Image: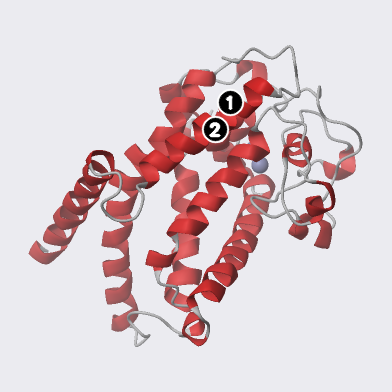
Amino acid sequence: MTSLLQTIENAYKGSWNCLVNQIIHPFSDGISSFYVLIFLSLAIWTIEICLPWRKNQSVLRKDFWLDAFYMFFNYYLFGLIIFAALSNTTSVLFSELMGSIGMPRRYIFDFFHYFPVWLQVIIFFMIRDFLQWCIHNLFHRIPFLWRFHKLHHSVREMGFAAHLRYHFMENVVYQLIGFVVLSYILHFKLEYGFYVYMIGTLIGHLNHANLGWDYGPLKYILNNPKMHIWHHVKDLPKDHRKGVNFGISLSCWDYLFKTNYIPSDGRDVELGFEGVENYPSNFFEQQIEPFKFN
Ligand SMILES: [Zn+2]
Ligand SMILES: [Zn+2]
């Protein structure tokens, strides 16, 4: 018990120190993801302002500041401090549990070890993205999970910062499944993950940006704003009711599994879901909403 408490305490201290270090020393260990997030956000916001797709959408669109808060909450307040600490603790407990049932404690298959680092990163990116595509499907198809994912679909006016408007439980589900598959089963060393996370953030910001871009022929590989807007559309035809365009960074999974849907130019489509008008509009109520059963 003492060692478990010590593990939790060390994990929280480690996460907190890491956050403080990232803010105070931007270049101490490569470049700090805190400043990369700020830089990417400002860069894409600038492009949105210069080349807006929906020209009548205000620069400070509806819920801009709420979404800006979500960016730092999900990446830092929750992601780094709470979740990183919890997941460090969970990985220790997980390895104890696996050991106690006769399974390997650290990993099952040293899959990534067979490839050079650059190829490891590409394979990691692709497996991770496919895994996320599968999980995103589940968030739409399982009613209990949809309760949490609804928050991301409550966006009424789309802009880059909407990318990280999601419930903290999404972090828990995505990261836990990612940890088990990529780290425990396939033994990916997370220190190589930084560039993947940053590329994922860039593509995710662009997917939600007020930009009429689809990257030409690359649209069959890369997710893009003209495709992702249809993921957020309020009214879908009956045969697509469970959702369309589930891609996170890559669009190829949707083309491969026939969940792609871009019937026309989506610039002015209505966003949300049935009843979105009555969905809570502030952070705290949005966090509690999925747990209300009545
Ligand atoms: Zn979705
Ligand atoms: Zn989205």
Indicate the amino acid at tag 2.
Ala
Disc 1/disc 2 C-alpha distance (Å)? 5 Å
34 vs 73, nearest the viewer: 34
Instruction: Determine whether label 1 and label 2 are within 8 Å by CB.
Output: yes
Q: Position of residue 93 (x, y in %)?
A: 28, 68
Residue at the (40%, 72%) spot, across then down: 189
Disc 1 secondary structure class: helix
The residue under label 1 is 46
- On the image, which quarter does residue 10 sit in? bottom left
Against 27, is 275 above or below? Answer: above
Residue at the (86%, 41%) spot, across then down: 262
Q: Residues within 10 Å of mark 1 (few under 14, many from 20)?
A: few
The way the protein has been coloured in the rendering is secondary structure
Residue at the (52%, 68%) spot, across then down: 121
Q: Which mark is residue 43?
A: 2
Q: Residues within 10 Å of mark 2 (few under 14, many from 20)?
A: few
Report the residue that reaches farthest toward the left. 2
Asked if residue 111 lies left or right of residue 211, the reply is: left
Q: Quadrant of ligand 1?
A: top right
Dividing the image into 4 quarters, which one contains the C terminus?
A: top right
